[in-house]
Protein backbone atom coordinates (compact mmCIF):
# COMPACT_ATOMS: atom_id res chain seq x y z
CA UNK A 1 0.00 0.00 0.00
CA UNK A 2 1.33 3.42 -0.85
CA UNK A 3 1.81 6.33 1.52
CA UNK A 4 -0.84 8.14 -0.44
CA UNK A 5 -3.42 5.64 0.61
CA UNK A 6 -2.29 5.84 4.24
CA UNK A 7 -2.73 9.58 4.12
CA UNK A 8 -6.13 9.19 2.52
CA UNK A 9 -7.33 6.83 5.26
CA UNK A 10 -5.94 9.07 7.99
CA UNK A 11 -7.48 12.20 6.50
CA UNK A 12 -10.88 10.55 6.23
CA UNK A 13 -10.72 9.31 9.83
CA UNK A 14 -9.46 12.64 11.16
CA UNK A 15 -12.15 14.56 9.38
CA UNK A 16 -14.89 12.40 10.82
CA UNK A 17 -13.56 11.53 14.30
CA UNK A 18 -11.00 14.27 14.96
CA UNK A 19 -9.76 14.27 18.51
CA UNK A 20 -11.20 10.82 19.25
CA UNK A 21 -8.39 9.17 17.32
CA UNK A 22 -5.51 7.85 19.41
CA UNK A 23 -1.94 7.18 18.42
CA UNK A 24 -1.07 6.38 14.82
CA UNK A 25 1.83 4.16 13.79
CA UNK A 26 3.02 2.12 10.83
CA UNK A 27 4.80 -1.01 12.07
CA UNK A 28 6.10 -2.99 9.07
CA UNK A 29 4.20 -0.66 6.76
CA UNK A 30 0.77 -1.50 8.14
CA UNK A 31 -1.17 1.59 9.15
CA UNK A 32 -2.35 1.19 12.75
CA UNK A 33 -4.78 3.52 14.45
CA UNK A 34 -5.93 3.49 18.04
CA UNK A 35 -9.58 4.30 18.61
CA UNK A 36 -11.73 4.57 21.74
CA UNK A 37 -13.56 1.33 22.46
CA UNK A 38 -16.90 3.10 22.78
CA UNK A 39 -16.77 4.29 19.16
CA UNK A 40 -15.76 1.02 17.53
CA UNK A 41 -19.03 0.49 15.70
CA UNK A 42 -19.10 4.06 14.38
CA UNK A 43 -15.58 3.73 13.07
CA UNK A 44 -16.15 0.32 11.45
CA UNK A 45 -19.41 1.46 9.90
CA UNK A 46 -17.81 4.63 8.58
CA UNK A 47 -14.85 2.78 7.04
CA UNK A 48 -16.98 0.07 5.52
CA UNK A 49 -19.36 2.45 3.79
CA UNK A 50 -16.92 5.22 2.90
CA UNK A 51 -17.01 5.81 -0.87
CA UNK A 52 -13.25 6.02 -1.42
CA UNK A 53 -12.14 3.50 1.20
CA UNK A 54 -14.70 0.67 1.23
CA UNK A 55 -12.93 -1.41 3.93
CA UNK A 56 -15.44 -4.18 3.46
CA UNK A 57 -13.49 -7.24 4.58
CA UNK A 58 -12.67 -8.16 8.18
CA UNK A 59 -9.42 -10.11 7.84
CA UNK A 60 -8.92 -10.77 11.51
CA UNK A 61 -10.14 -9.91 14.95
CA UNK A 62 -8.17 -10.83 18.03
CA UNK A 63 -6.93 -9.55 21.35
CA UNK A 64 -3.67 -8.96 23.22
CA UNK A 65 -3.09 -8.87 26.96
CA UNK A 66 -0.77 -6.17 28.34
CA UNK A 67 -0.73 -6.82 32.09
CA UNK A 68 1.70 -3.96 32.83
CA UNK A 69 -0.59 -1.29 31.39
CA UNK A 70 -3.24 -0.59 34.05
CA UNK A 71 -6.66 0.41 32.75
CA UNK A 72 -5.71 -0.63 29.20
CA UNK A 73 -4.84 -4.28 29.75
CA UNK A 74 -6.80 -5.80 26.91
CA UNK A 75 -6.31 -4.61 23.34
CA UNK A 76 -8.87 -5.72 20.80
CA UNK A 77 -7.37 -5.65 17.33
CA UNK A 78 -9.26 -5.39 14.05
CA UNK A 79 -7.63 -6.00 10.67
CA UNK A 80 -9.57 -4.52 7.79
CA UNK A 81 -9.05 -4.88 4.07
CA UNK A 82 -10.64 -3.16 1.12
CA UNK A 83 -11.26 -5.69 -1.64
CA UNK A 84 -12.06 -2.81 -3.99
CA UNK A 85 -9.09 -0.51 -3.43
CA UNK A 86 -6.63 -2.92 -1.81
CA UNK A 87 -6.17 -0.89 1.35
CA UNK A 88 -5.27 -2.47 4.65
CA UNK A 89 -5.78 -0.99 8.09
CA UNK A 90 -5.36 -2.14 11.67
CA UNK A 91 -7.52 -0.72 14.45
CA UNK A 92 -6.81 -1.12 18.15
CA UNK A 93 -9.18 -0.49 21.02
CA UNK A 94 -8.05 -0.80 24.63
CA UNK A 95 -10.22 -2.08 27.46
CA UNK A 96 -9.72 -2.32 31.22
CA UNK A 97 -9.48 -5.92 32.39
CA UNK A 98 -12.03 -5.24 35.14
CA UNK A 99 -14.70 -4.59 32.51
CA UNK A 100 -13.59 -5.90 29.10
CA UNK A 101 -16.71 -4.95 27.18
CA UNK A 102 -16.93 -3.81 23.59
CA UNK A 103 -19.71 -3.74 21.03
CA UNK A 104 -19.94 -6.74 18.73
CA UNK A 105 -19.15 -6.17 15.06
CA UNK A 106 -21.39 -9.03 13.91
CA UNK A 107 -24.01 -6.64 12.52
CA UNK A 108 -21.42 -5.21 10.12
CA UNK A 109 -19.33 -8.28 9.39
CA UNK A 110 -20.72 -11.81 9.70
CA UNK A 111 -17.14 -13.03 9.88
CA UNK A 112 -16.85 -11.37 13.28
CA UNK A 113 -19.12 -14.00 14.81
CA UNK A 114 -16.59 -16.82 15.25
CA UNK A 115 -13.63 -14.47 15.66
CA UNK A 116 -15.34 -12.78 18.58
CA UNK A 117 -16.19 -16.13 20.08
CA UNK A 118 -12.53 -17.09 19.85
CA UNK A 119 -11.43 -13.80 21.38
CA UNK A 120 -13.91 -14.34 24.19
CA UNK A 121 -12.71 -17.90 24.60
CA UNK A 122 -9.07 -16.97 25.07
CA UNK A 123 -9.18 -13.47 26.59
CA UNK A 124 -12.65 -13.13 28.09
CA UNK A 125 -13.55 -10.05 26.04
CA UNK A 126 -17.31 -9.55 26.29
CA UNK A 127 -18.82 -8.53 22.98
CA UNK A 128 -22.14 -6.89 23.72
CA UNK A 129 -25.02 -7.84 21.41
CA UNK A 130 -23.17 -10.83 20.04
CA UNK A 131 -25.83 -13.39 19.01
CA UNK A 132 -24.11 -16.42 20.56
CA UNK A 133 -21.15 -15.57 22.75
CA UNK A 134 -19.83 -18.89 24.05
CA UNK A 135 -16.54 -20.77 23.86
CA UNK A 136 -15.57 -22.06 20.45
CA UNK A 137 -12.24 -23.90 20.73
CA UNK A 138 -11.70 -24.80 24.36
CA UNK A 139 -13.82 -27.12 26.44
CA UNK A 140 -17.08 -25.61 27.60
CA UNK A 141 -16.20 -26.56 31.16
CA UNK A 142 -13.00 -24.48 31.16
CA UNK A 143 -13.25 -21.85 33.88
CA UNK A 144 -10.56 -19.37 32.87
CA UNK A 145 -9.23 -17.53 29.84
CA UNK A 146 -6.01 -19.33 28.99
CA UNK A 147 -4.16 -16.67 26.99
CA UNK A 148 -4.40 -14.03 29.70
CA UNK A 149 -0.93 -13.78 31.15
CA UNK A 150 -1.87 -14.34 34.77
CA UNK A 151 -2.46 -18.01 33.93
CA UNK A 152 0.40 -20.45 33.62
CA UNK A 153 0.83 -21.85 30.15
CA UNK A 154 1.65 -25.27 31.54
CA UNK A 155 -1.11 -27.61 32.47
CA UNK A 156 -1.57 -27.48 36.21
CA UNK A 157 -2.69 -31.09 36.46
CA UNK A 158 0.65 -32.46 35.34
CA UNK A 159 2.56 -34.08 38.18
CA UNK A 160 5.48 -35.89 36.59
CA UNK A 161 7.73 -32.84 36.30
CA UNK A 162 10.53 -32.39 38.76
CA UNK A 163 11.17 -28.66 39.20
CA UNK A 164 14.89 -29.27 39.67
CA UNK A 165 15.22 -30.24 36.03
CA UNK A 166 13.47 -27.12 34.78
CA UNK A 167 15.56 -24.53 36.62
CA UNK A 168 12.81 -23.68 39.10
CA UNK B 1 6.76 -69.52 5.70
CA UNK B 2 3.71 -69.95 7.83
CA UNK B 3 4.44 -69.98 11.50
CA UNK B 4 1.93 -71.62 13.76
CA UNK B 5 1.40 -70.44 17.33
CA UNK B 6 3.30 -72.42 19.91
CA UNK B 7 1.15 -74.92 21.67
CA UNK B 8 0.46 -74.21 25.32
CA UNK B 9 1.48 -76.39 28.25
CA UNK B 10 -0.58 -79.54 28.49
CA UNK B 11 -0.74 -83.29 28.63
CA UNK B 12 -0.11 -85.07 25.40
CA UNK B 13 -0.62 -88.65 24.39
CA UNK B 14 -1.33 -90.58 21.28
CA UNK B 15 -4.34 -88.98 19.61
CA UNK B 16 -5.12 -86.43 22.30
CA UNK B 17 -3.90 -83.23 23.83
CA UNK B 18 -5.31 -81.83 27.06
CA UNK B 19 -4.81 -78.29 28.34
CA UNK B 20 -6.83 -75.64 30.10
CA UNK B 21 -9.50 -73.63 28.32
CA UNK B 22 -7.83 -70.39 29.48
CA UNK B 23 -4.72 -71.18 27.52
CA UNK B 24 -6.46 -72.19 24.31
CA UNK B 25 -8.65 -69.13 24.30
CA UNK B 26 -5.71 -66.90 25.21
CA UNK B 27 -3.74 -68.30 22.30
CA UNK B 28 -6.60 -67.76 19.88
CA UNK B 29 -7.27 -64.22 21.09
CA UNK B 30 -3.64 -63.17 21.11
CA UNK B 31 -3.16 -64.11 17.48
CA UNK B 32 -6.30 -62.50 16.18
CA UNK B 33 -6.42 -59.08 17.83
CA UNK B 34 -8.48 -56.54 15.94
CA UNK B 35 -6.99 -53.11 16.58
CA UNK B 36 -8.91 -49.87 16.48
CA UNK B 37 -6.44 -47.17 15.43
CA UNK B 38 -7.21 -43.90 17.21
CA UNK B 39 -4.61 -41.82 15.41
CA UNK B 40 -4.69 -38.09 15.98
CA UNK B 41 -1.28 -36.80 14.95
CA UNK B 42 2.34 -37.59 14.09
CA UNK B 43 2.45 -40.94 15.91
CA UNK B 44 -0.40 -42.04 13.66
CA UNK B 45 1.99 -41.71 10.72
CA UNK B 46 4.31 -44.22 12.36
CA UNK B 47 1.36 -46.50 12.77
CA UNK B 48 0.68 -46.28 9.04
CA UNK B 49 4.24 -47.47 8.46
CA UNK B 50 3.65 -50.25 10.99
CA UNK B 51 0.66 -51.44 8.99
CA UNK B 52 2.53 -51.11 5.70
CA UNK B 53 4.31 -53.96 3.99
CA UNK B 54 7.80 -53.22 5.41
CA UNK B 55 6.78 -53.84 8.99
CA UNK B 56 3.43 -55.47 8.42
CA UNK B 57 1.45 -55.85 11.59
CA UNK B 58 -0.51 -58.56 9.76
CA UNK B 59 2.26 -60.98 10.72
CA UNK B 60 0.89 -60.82 14.24
CA UNK B 61 -2.68 -61.54 13.27
CA UNK B 62 -3.71 -57.92 13.43
CA UNK B 63 -4.22 -57.04 9.80
CA UNK B 64 -7.93 -56.55 10.24
CA UNK B 65 -8.29 -52.99 11.52
CA UNK B 66 -11.63 -52.32 13.03
CA UNK B 67 -12.97 -48.84 12.49
CA UNK B 68 -15.93 -49.60 14.68
CA UNK B 69 -15.16 -49.85 18.38
CA UNK B 70 -17.84 -52.50 18.76
CA UNK B 71 -15.79 -55.07 16.88
CA UNK B 72 -12.36 -54.09 18.19
CA UNK B 73 -10.26 -55.84 20.83
CA UNK B 74 -7.34 -53.45 21.04
CA UNK B 75 -7.57 -49.68 21.23
CA UNK B 76 -4.36 -48.15 19.90
CA UNK B 77 -4.16 -44.49 20.87
CA UNK B 78 -1.53 -42.72 18.82
CA UNK B 79 -1.08 -39.01 19.09
CA UNK B 80 -1.90 -35.91 21.06
CA UNK B 81 -5.27 -36.05 22.76
CA UNK B 82 -6.72 -32.59 23.34
CA UNK B 83 -8.85 -32.20 26.43
CA UNK B 84 -11.83 -31.63 24.20
CA UNK B 85 -11.14 -34.98 22.54
CA UNK B 86 -11.02 -36.74 25.91
CA UNK B 87 -14.77 -37.48 26.19
CA UNK B 88 -14.74 -38.85 22.63
CA UNK B 89 -11.91 -41.24 23.43
CA UNK B 90 -13.68 -42.32 26.57
CA UNK B 91 -16.85 -43.01 24.63
CA UNK B 92 -14.95 -45.05 22.07
CA UNK B 93 -13.42 -47.13 24.86
CA UNK B 94 -16.82 -47.50 26.45
CA UNK B 95 -18.30 -48.83 23.21
CA UNK B 96 -15.75 -51.62 22.89
CA UNK B 97 -16.87 -55.02 24.07
CA UNK B 98 -14.97 -56.92 26.75
CA UNK B 99 -12.36 -58.24 26.67
CA UNK B 100 -10.51 -55.13 25.52
CA UNK B 101 -6.97 -53.84 25.77
CA UNK B 102 -5.43 -50.42 25.35
CA UNK B 103 -2.04 -49.56 23.87
CA UNK B 104 -0.83 -46.01 24.40
CA UNK B 105 1.65 -45.11 21.66
CA UNK B 106 4.04 -42.18 22.02
CA UNK B 107 4.85 -39.56 24.60
CA UNK B 108 1.70 -37.54 23.92
CA UNK B 109 -0.79 -40.30 24.53
CA UNK B 110 1.20 -41.56 27.51
CA UNK B 111 1.90 -38.30 29.33
CA UNK B 112 0.96 -35.28 27.22
CA UNK B 113 4.49 -35.26 25.80
CA UNK B 114 5.90 -31.89 24.85
CA UNK B 115 2.42 -30.37 24.95
CA UNK B 116 2.40 -29.42 28.59
CA UNK B 117 -0.30 -26.85 28.05
CA UNK B 118 -3.84 -25.91 28.95
CA UNK B 119 -5.48 -27.61 26.00
CA UNK B 120 -3.89 -31.06 26.03
CA UNK B 121 -4.81 -34.07 28.13
CA UNK B 122 -1.73 -35.03 30.16
CA UNK B 123 -1.88 -38.74 29.38
CA UNK B 124 -4.85 -40.85 28.37
CA UNK B 125 -4.56 -42.88 31.57
CA UNK B 126 -6.39 -39.99 33.21
CA UNK B 127 -9.58 -41.09 31.51
CA UNK B 128 -9.19 -44.73 30.46
CA UNK B 129 -7.10 -47.65 31.76
CA UNK B 130 -3.97 -48.43 29.72
CA UNK B 131 -2.33 -51.86 29.42
CA UNK B 132 0.93 -51.06 27.64
CA UNK B 133 2.79 -47.78 27.07
CA UNK B 134 5.14 -47.30 24.13
CA UNK B 135 7.61 -44.46 24.78
CA UNK B 136 9.08 -42.28 22.04
CA UNK B 137 8.32 -39.15 20.09
CA UNK B 138 7.46 -40.77 17.80
CA UNK B 139 8.30 -44.41 18.52
CA UNK B 140 9.64 -46.34 15.54
CA UNK B 141 7.40 -49.03 14.04
CA UNK B 142 9.60 -51.67 15.70
CA UNK B 143 8.66 -50.19 19.06
CA UNK B 144 4.99 -50.17 18.21
CA UNK B 145 5.26 -53.83 17.21
CA UNK B 146 7.05 -54.52 20.49
CA UNK B 147 4.10 -52.89 22.24
CA UNK B 148 1.63 -55.07 20.36
CA UNK B 149 3.69 -58.15 21.26
CA UNK B 150 3.58 -57.12 24.93
CA UNK B 151 -0.20 -56.88 24.60
CA UNK B 152 -0.25 -60.35 23.00
CA UNK B 153 1.67 -61.62 26.01
CA UNK B 154 -0.92 -60.13 28.34
CA UNK B 155 -3.76 -61.58 26.30
CA UNK B 156 -2.23 -65.03 26.28
CA UNK B 157 -1.80 -65.13 30.02
CA UNK B 158 -5.01 -63.48 31.09
CA UNK B 159 -7.29 -65.57 33.27
CA UNK B 160 -10.80 -65.94 31.91
CA UNK B 161 -12.13 -64.79 35.26
CA UNK B 162 -10.10 -61.60 35.43
CA UNK B 163 -12.80 -59.37 33.97
CA UNK B 164 -15.39 -60.64 36.39
CA UNK B 165 -13.26 -59.96 39.43
CA UNK B 166 -14.08 -57.36 42.05
CA UNK B 167 -10.69 -55.82 41.50
CA UNK B 168 -11.37 -55.23 37.81
CA UNK B 169 -14.75 -53.71 38.57
CA UNK B 170 -13.20 -51.37 41.10
CA UNK B 171 -10.61 -50.35 38.56
CA UNK B 172 -13.32 -49.48 36.02
CA UNK B 173 -15.26 -47.60 38.65
CA UNK B 174 -12.22 -45.51 39.46
CA UNK B 175 -12.40 -44.29 35.85
CA UNK B 176 -16.16 -43.77 36.09
CA UNK B 177 -16.70 -46.59 33.63
CA UNK B 178 -18.93 -49.51 34.39
S1 LIG C 1 4.60 -38.26 20.87
FE1 LIG C 1 5.71 -36.94 19.41
S2 LIG C 1 5.37 -37.93 17.43
FE2 LIG C 1 3.82 -38.76 18.84
S3 LIG C 1 2.02 -37.48 18.58
FE3 LIG C 1 3.23 -36.62 20.25
S4 LIG C 1 4.51 -35.05 19.28
FE4 LIG C 1 3.76 -36.40 17.67
Image (cartoon, coloured by chain):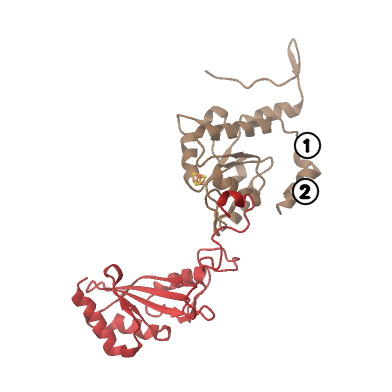
Chain colours: A red, B brown
Residue B138: x and y, percent?
A: 50, 41
Chain bearing tag 2 is B
Left or right: where does residue B95 sit relative to residue A46? right
* Residue B34 visible at all: yes
Mark 1 vs mark 2: which is more N-terminal?
Answer: 1
Looking at the rendering, in which quadrant would you find the N terminus of chain A?
Answer: bottom left
Q: Secondary structure at mark 2?
A: helix
Mark 1 vs mark 2: in front: 2
Left or right: where does residue B99 sit relative to residue B56? right
- Foreground of the two, B116 or A122: B116
Which residue is found at the position 77% from the left and 47% from the top?
B169
Residue A45 drawn above or below residue A114: below
Q: Which residue is mark 1?
A: B161
Q: Secondary structure at mark 1?
A: loop
Which residue is found at the position 48% from the left and 47% from the top?
B41
Residue A82: x and y, percent?
A: 27, 74
Q: For the residues marked 1 and 2, what is the alpha-carbon distance in whole angstroms?
A: 15 Å
Left or right: where does residue B46 sit relative to residue B134? left
Chain bearing tag 1 is B
Residue B152 drawn above or below residue A1: above
Amino acid sequence: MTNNQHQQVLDALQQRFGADLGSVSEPYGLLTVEIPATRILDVLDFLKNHEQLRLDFLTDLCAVHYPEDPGREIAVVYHLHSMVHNIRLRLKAFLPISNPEIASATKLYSAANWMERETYDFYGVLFTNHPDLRRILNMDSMDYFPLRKEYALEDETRNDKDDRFFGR
Amino acid sequence: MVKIGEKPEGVEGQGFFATSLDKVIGLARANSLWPLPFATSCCGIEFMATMGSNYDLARFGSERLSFSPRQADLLMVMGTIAKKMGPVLKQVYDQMAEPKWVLSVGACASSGGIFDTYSVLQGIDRIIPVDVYVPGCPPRPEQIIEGVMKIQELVKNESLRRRHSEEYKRMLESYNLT
